[in-house]
Image: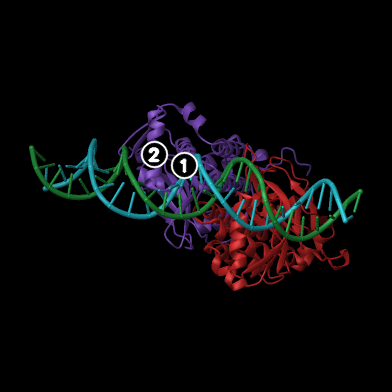
Chain colours: A purple, B red, C green, D cyan
DNA sequence: AGCTATATGTGCGTTATCGCACAGACTTTT
DNA sequence: AAAAGTCTGTGCGATAACGCACATATAGCT
């Protein structure tokens, strides 16, 4: 299911691939390929981080867990991003938990290395901050979405966000797990998923969901998906490899 | 109601007051005192920012607005913070709107100045990033809160967060406006507020809310308030004036 | 083939919130 | 003093999601 080690490449991660060659070389010496199995907890709420992670073929959920055990996903991070931003933001810890939602691989980098690199105040810093802003957008949009949209709309958004971070058009995830991510009942997901299946948008069976009609699914999703995607594209994906001007965001600046 | 100009001081803002003297001197030459009247829109969704704002006696809400006009507050910023983080994060714009929720004053700084200061990669950068992380916590906690807690719990959280950013124990805000902030119906707020009043926790009348029993209110609030407060304290307030070591977050670092 | 885990389907009463309509109370204006 | 505007209270049916209980279906194991 997951690609063999031989096919892994740090450049599959969009942040790493957007770095100028010099920066990438410096970092790549310390990048360590790691398998990221389903359910793996990269960091726990309040825990001290030892690494940052650059997913390549895996997807990771950021979860907030309440005292009573209830939880909700506040963002999804895949090959477009990085995990462990609190390391370079300066807080060292966060009240969130990071759980691998879709098994795959990623590269990790020791805390010291990312901090040192960040301290150079060069393209790496600027790129990571741009990504952080995209992440902030995703979190905010999730907050609004939780307030105003139905389970079905949110399920569509969630499926699309997850699929965008994979190469395949199907993903391995039980309705029970999805319910945990969305912070709703499993039955609620069953209802919504059943509805989407009867509408011919998806097909699912025992923990495997396949998207049959992507445009239809986008149509059934709330605007939140588009807002998040647009912002990630604007802030990250549109940066061509090794263009430090753009990475620095100085193209229109008046230095 | 609001303090006269003569009583205003940039050091009322916790970020500015946490800066080492040298950095503060450099910035203060360009700080411009501005009144921030109720309802003032500091920036619009997608709009380009000309300034960052450091509130002193005002409170500002970050709102996300949906296509159908529905909205929800994702964070509150007062004298502990700064508005316009997307300027230094590199994105230039955000999909959120910033509205003055409680009239007062603040200091603003031209976009170029904050960017230049940020580019020095010194204490200002590190402090602003720490604050940004606190803001991220607030946004995330809001997302979970929207999912799992009742209107009454959220109202308590909101009141406490707002009060912490004022010197007084009462605030000027109609239930209609609060409903807009929380993204719920006005009647829902009326219900919850009536309940809190009958319980002797607050007193309100035509747009003026006074907290009578703060411990009681904290008790009626969900944990989200405490989580956000703890994180802001940890990341910002606990930094003594002009201790660059702490601001840089290097006290435990292994340079 | 049979057993067991796990995944999904369904029904039903409960609850929180919504949407709407309108009544009362207080403030400001004229 | 009257009128107009604003803020708050209340009632009622509709709806979305919840909590729980249990039925059914499928995959994997022995």
| SS state under label 1 | helix
Q: Is residue A227 left or right of residue A76?
A: right
Subunit ID for the residue under disc 2: A
Q: For residue B244, which quarter of the picture?
A: bottom right
Position of B2 relative to B62 (above/below) = below
Give the label on residue B185, or none: none
The reply to whether the C-beta atoms of the residues labelled 2 and 1 are less than 8 Å apart is yes
Which quadrant: the N terminus of chain B? Answer: bottom right
Which quadrant: the C terminus of chain B? Answer: bottom right
Q: Give percent across and percent down for residue B235.
A: 61, 64
Q: Residue at x 41, y 28 (%)?
A: A199
Q: Residues within 10 Å of mark 1 (few under 14, many from 20)?
A: many
Viewer-side residue, B59 vs A4: B59
| SS state under label 2 | helix
Sequence-earlier tag: 2 or 1 = 1
Q: Residue at x 62, y 72 (%)?
A: B214
Q: Give percent across and percent down for residue A82.
A: 51, 48
Position of B29 relative to C2 (above/below) = below
Q: Is residue A69 left or right of residue B35?
A: left
- The residue where tag 1 is placed is A151
Q: Would you say residue A167 is visible in this rendering?
A: yes
Q: Give percent across and percent down for residue B145.
A: 53, 55
- The residue where tag 2 is placed is A191
């Amino acid at each position: 299911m997951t690609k063999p080690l031989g096919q892994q490449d740090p450049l599959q991660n969009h942040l790493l691939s957007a770095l100028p060659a010099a920066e990438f070389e410096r970092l790549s010496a310390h990048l360590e390929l790691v398998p990221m199995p389903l359910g793996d907890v990269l960091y726990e709420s309040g825990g001290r981080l030892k690494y940052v992670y650059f997913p390549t073929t895996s997807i990771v959920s950021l979860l907030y867990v309440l005292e009573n055990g209830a939880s909700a996903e506040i963002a999804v991070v895949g090959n477009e991003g990085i995990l462990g931003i609190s390391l370079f933001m300066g807080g060292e810890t966060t009240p969130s938990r990071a759980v691998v939602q879709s098994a795959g691989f990623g590269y990790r980098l020791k805390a010291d290395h990312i901090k040192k690199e960040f301290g150079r105040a060069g393209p790496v810093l600027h790129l990571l901050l741009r990504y952080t802003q995209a992440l902030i957008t995703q979190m905010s949009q999730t907050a609004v979405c939780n307030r105003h949209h139905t389970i079905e709309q949110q399920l569509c958004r969630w499926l699309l966000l997850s699929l965008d971070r994979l190469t395949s058009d199907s993903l391995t995830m039980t309705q029970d797990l999805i319910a945990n991510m969305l912070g709703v009942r499993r039955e609620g997901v069953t209802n919504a998923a059943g509805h989407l299946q009867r509408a011919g948008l998806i097909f699912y069976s025992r923990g495997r969901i396949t998207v049959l009609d992507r445009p239809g699914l986008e149509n059934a999703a709330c605007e939140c998906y588009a807002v998040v995607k647009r912002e990630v594209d604007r802030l990250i994906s549109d940066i061509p490899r090794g263009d430090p001007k753009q990475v620095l965001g100085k193209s229109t600046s008046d230095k």
